[in-house]
Image: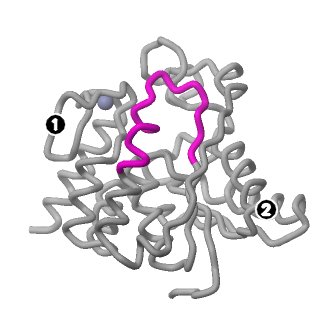
Amino acid sequence: MTNPSSSALVLFSGGQDSTVCLAWALERFDRVETVGFRYGQRHAVEMEVRPRIRAGMAALNARWKKRLGDDHVLDLPALAAISETALTRDMAIGIADGGLPTTFVPGRNILFLSYAAALGYRRGIADLVGGMCETDYSGYPDCRDTTIKALGRALTLGLDRPVTIHTPLMPFDKAETFDLALEIGGESFLNLVVEETHSCYLGDRGRRHDWGYGCGTCPACELRARGYEKFKADLI
Ligand code: ZN
């Protein structure tokens, strides 16, 4: 369903999920802006692939090109300073005491969405789009639907204007996200997602697999590889 006079702000990290969300938004909104965050990630690969993905998507589809608006990058060094995680410090990725992966940055999505809402307020955009999904990352409490819905209500109250947070991937696993990419943008968009989007926690883009670039062994690579295998198997 397209709302021709509407606009959206997509939380765009350069990963598989947020890239599919960007395509989802470009099909639905008249103007789509993107926002990315620098928060002391151990590698800058995601920030490097973001402009390539945006340019690639604009080249794929004339309507997307017309609708794709400004890109914003916000620095959040304070988030790195208060985080003791595998993404921002040189420690092993695994499961910490308490059952959450060490890649978990406490409350990260709450902060990202709050910053996005503030930016959206200044840009006249009330619709935020994020790639949170509770299927693959049920250990991340800030990716859960109940958290996102409560935050949407809090932001609406706090900004005194409606804020809608769209999470089109919420019920999907990685295989279904590849499926959605194919459904929205066809083979050429699926190829762009595989080739250009980045998931690997270690920032490895030296090794190319069927499912894209990555170390192949970190939890993000394993999740992406398993999802791609399942997606391919379901296609046959
Ligand atoms: Zn990896």
Q: Is 80 situated above or below 18?
A: above
| Neighbours of disc 2 within 10 Å: few (<14), some (14-19), many (20+) | some
Report the quarter where the C terminus lies. Answer: bottom left
Q: Secondary structure at mark 2?
A: helix
Instruction: Pick the residue in front: 153 or 54.
Output: 54
Q: Position of residue 13 (x, y in %)?
A: 49, 46
Q: Is residue 180 magenta?
A: no
Residue 75 located left or right of residue 70: right
Quarter of image, res 234:
bottom left
Picture quadrant of ligand 1:
top left
Q: Position of residue 138 (x, y in %)?
A: 51, 46
Name the residue tied to disc 2: 121
Q: Measuring 61% from the left and 30% from the top, which residue is drawn there? A: 39
Q: Is residue 37 magenta?
A: yes
Q: Is 18 situated above or below 2?
A: above
Number of the label disc, if any, that sits on residue 29: none
Residue 143 located left or right of residue 183: right
Quarter of image, res 219:
top left
Instruction: Pick the residue in front: 41 or 138.
Output: 41
Name the residue tied to disc 1: 208
Q: Position of residue 213 (x, y in %)?
A: 23, 37
Residue 59 located left or right of residue 94: left
Rounded to the nearest whole Å, what is the CA distance between mark 2 and mark 1? Answer: 40 Å
Q: Position of residue 43 (x, y in %)?
A: 44, 25
Mark 2 residue type = Tyr
- The residue range painted magenta reads 36-52
Instruction: Pick the residue in front: 71 or 199.
Output: 71
Mark 1 residue type = Arg
Residue at disc 2, CB closer than 8 Å to ligand 1: no
Q: Measuring 38% from the left and 42% from the top, which residue is drawn there? A: 49
